[in-house]
Amino acid sequence: MPKRKPRKPMSKQAQHVRLINRWLPGLVLTARSSTGLDTDGDPILAISHRRQGGAVGDIARAKLQHEILNWQHHWLVTVFVECETPEGDFYKDSTEFEAYGVRLNDQAELVRPELDTIKNKANPNHYKDHGWQSEILPNRKQEKGRAA
C-alpha cells in the first residue's frame, strides 16, 4: 500500500481564517432590556449560533471578539417586543431588516427608531420585555463558495 503524502501543517493565520469563516456566518447576538447593561453602558449580549449548540458564546467571546465588534458585516436584525395578557398568554411583535456593511456598535442608530415604533404599537398594559437580535449573514464570497 503506497504511503500517503504528509499534509502540510496550517499556519496560525490560516487556522484563524478558517475559524472566522466557520463561526461568523450564522452567529446570533441577542440583547434584551431584561438582561441589562454592562459597565460601559452597552447591552449584555447572549451569543448563539444558528447551526451549532451550546458553547458558542465562549468561543466567540474569546477568539472572535475583535472580528465581531470591529468588522463590518451583513446583518439580519430582528427588533421585538414581548407581551403577556392578564390571562397568561404570551405574544410577540417583531420586525426585521437587513443592514449591509455595519459594525455591531453602529447598529444602535438603526435599531432605536424601529424599537420605538414597535413599542408604541404594543399594548402598554401587556408589555413584558423588548430587545433586538442580529445574525451575521454570509458575505458574497462565502455565498459563492456554498453555491459551488
Image (spheres, rainbow, N blue to C red):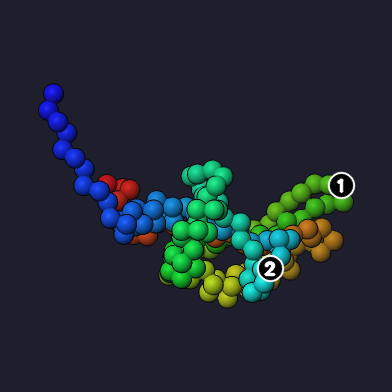
49 relative to 71 in the view: left or right:
right
Relative to 1, residue 9 above or below: below
Please tell me which residue lies in front, 58 or 23: 58
One can see residue 62 in this view: yes
Q: Quadrant of the N terminus?
A: top left
> What residue is shown at x 87% (from left), y 47% (from top)?
87
> What residue is shown at x 46% (from left), y 58% (from top)?
63
Q: Secondary structure at mark 1?
A: loop
In front: mark 2 or mark 1?
2
Residue at which label 2 appears: 37
Residue at which label 1 appears: 87
Please tell me which residue lies in front, 8 or 40: 8
* Distance (Cα) linking label 2 and label 1: 31 Å
Q: Estimate the x, y position of residue 142 in percent, counting from the top left.
A: 34, 55
Q: Estimate the x, y position of residue 37 in percent, counting from the top left.
A: 68, 68
8 relative to 104 in the view: left or right:
left
Please tell me which residue lies in front, 68 or 75: 68
Please tell me which residue lies in front, 122 or 32: 32
Which callout, 2 or 1, points at the residue further toward the start of the chain?
Answer: 2
Residue 11 found in image quarter: bottom left
Q: Residue furthest left?
A: 2
Q: Estimate the x, y position of residue 62 in percent, counting from the top left.
A: 50, 58
Q: Estimate the x, y position of residue 133 in percent, counting from the top left.
A: 59, 59
Q: Secondary structure at mark 2?
A: loop
